[in-house]
Structure formats: C-alpha cells, structure tokens
Image (cartoon, rainbow, N blue to C red):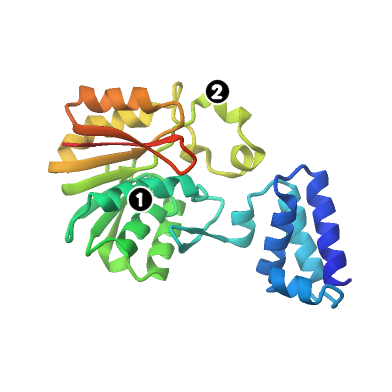
Amino acid sequence: MTISEAVQKAKKCLEEAHVPDYGTDAMLLLQSVCGISRAAYYARPEEELKDAEQYLEKVRLRAARIPLQQIVGETFFCGLRFRVTEDVLCPRQDTETLVEAALERSRRGDAFLDLCTGSGCIAVSLLCLGDGLSGCAADLSDAAIAVAAENAAYHGVSKRLRFFRGDLYDAVEGRFHMIVSNPPYIPTETISSLMEEVRDHEPRMALDGGRDGLGFYRRILAGADDYLLPGGWLLVEIGYDQAWSVRSMFDDKGFHSVRVIKDLGGMDRVVLGQR
C-alpha cells in the first residue's frame, strides 16, 4: 500500500465515523505513527508505506472516537510537550489563558499551589516559563499524579514541584503566594451531551462539577484563606457561562481586584482575585 492509498483509506474511515477534522487527524497520525510529515507525504505519495497496518490500526482507534492525544500519547500546551493518558484530561489551549494570567501576577521566588493538577500541564508550564517559581500540585487520582510527575521529570522541574494526593486541600501543607486550578466544572446532567471523545474517554472525575457545575469553586474558595498568604492570588478556569456566578463567590469571600479574563476565542475563561 502506498502512502497516498493509506491516507485516503484513513480519511474515508474517519469521515464515515463523523470525526471532526478527519483530514487533519489522518495526517497527524501519519506523522506520529510513521514519522512522515505533510511535506514528505506530498513529496513521495506513491512510496510504499511500510507501517501501513500499524497506521490504519491507530486510525481505527480514532474512528472509535478515542481522543487523538491519547492515541499518540502526547500533546502540546504552552509550547511544551506533555504526556497524555486516559487517566487525565487532555490539556486544551483555552487553559493557557489561566497560565498566562498566573505568570503575569507571579514574582521571582513565589510558591504556588495547583489544585486538580491532572496531567500537571499548568504547574509544569508555570515552572518552565516563570521566573524562579516553586510549586505544589494536588490531585485525588494516583494515576494522574503519576502522569504529572512524569511530565515534571521530562521538563526537568521535579525538584521544584511537590505532589499531594488528596481531595483539594486535604493533604496540602503550607501557604502559597498563588493558588491556581482548572477544576471539574461541567454540570452532572450536561456530561451526557458532550462530544464522545470527552464523554466516553476522559476521566469523569475531571469533568463532573456537581449538580450546577459550581461545587468545586465553592470548596476552593472556602479553603483559600487557610492556604493563601496575605496578598496572594486565586485564579480558576471557568465554563463559558459561569463568570457571573464564580465572580460573585470571589466578591462574597472578600477578594480584591476581582476580574474575568477572556480566552483567545472571546469566551469568559478565568476568574481571579487577590486575598
């Protein structure tokens, strides 16, 4: 089978499975599995594809709506490579807004706490891109912490990142200049309507924010004073329609300089405030 024949077969398979951007995914899998870039594909489309069966097997996984990131085992976030498994939420570009806002408010030597760390993409990005920061990261899932620890090791920041296994603050020790979190915020009844990739293949515990999707924000804010240093910042990612509710929680808790930040798509994405 030639490279061109394999790619056409892959595109047809993904299109019939109603995979969004099926053409792009076919090419990304070709590069990941076979090491053939888009440029190489166009340069020699009639060359035999030695890894055709392996390639088409990965295509079939994508047709089953397994997220592309899980199939290839990695993704990029804030320009950095992160390992991804079925045990963690796939890092999304929208969450980079949270990292950027945290970096703008950090100072050299600051210590931060990342709650619901998942893959560790937020914590590791802050350590890689910030100025002399140190951090702690907490998650309820042992499997997620293992992935985050691997990502920290890959980027050489393990010595500056301490992990706590527990529900939000349960196992956390110390006080911090900043708390950041991308908590579960999807209302329980809404999860069944999500895309198959998310609904069926990402960990439900990383999605389910309770009846109204706001449960984790209430708990994070309830404990923030015990873990934030005076003048410290709390920053959380939110769903597109949660800005008013979460901002009101910040105001009720007496936070100052409370504001909502939009992502690149113009959607409300981050609420932050200063103790």
Q: Residue 220, how many percent across, how many down?
A: 29, 34
* Residue in the foreground of this view, choosing between 225 and 133: 133
Q: Quadrant of the N terminus?
A: bottom right
Q: Which mark is residue 246?
A: none
SS state under label 1: helix
x 39%, y 61%: residue: 149
Out of 5 and 112, give the one closest to the viewer. 5
> What residue lies at 30% left-to-right and 30% top-to-bottom?
219
Residue 246 placement, left or right of 172:
right
Residue identified by numbered label 1? 99
Which is in the foreground here, disc 2 or disc 1? 1
User: Whole-percent x and y of residue 84?
Assistant: 53, 57
User: Is residue 250 found left or right of 266 in the rendered image?
Assistant: left
Looking at the picture, does residue 153 appear above or below residue 165? Answer: below
Q: Quadrant of residue 251?
A: top left
Numbered marks: total: 2
Counting from the top left corner in percent of width and height, residue 124 is at 36, 59
| Label 2, residues with CA under 10 Å away: few <14, some 14-19, many ≥20 | few
Q: Residue at x 39, y 26 (%)?
A: 214
Tell me, for residue 189, which label it has, or none. Answer: 2
Looking at the rendered structure, the secondary structure element under dot 2 is helix
Residue 165 visible here = no
Q: Amino acid at mark 2?
A: Glu
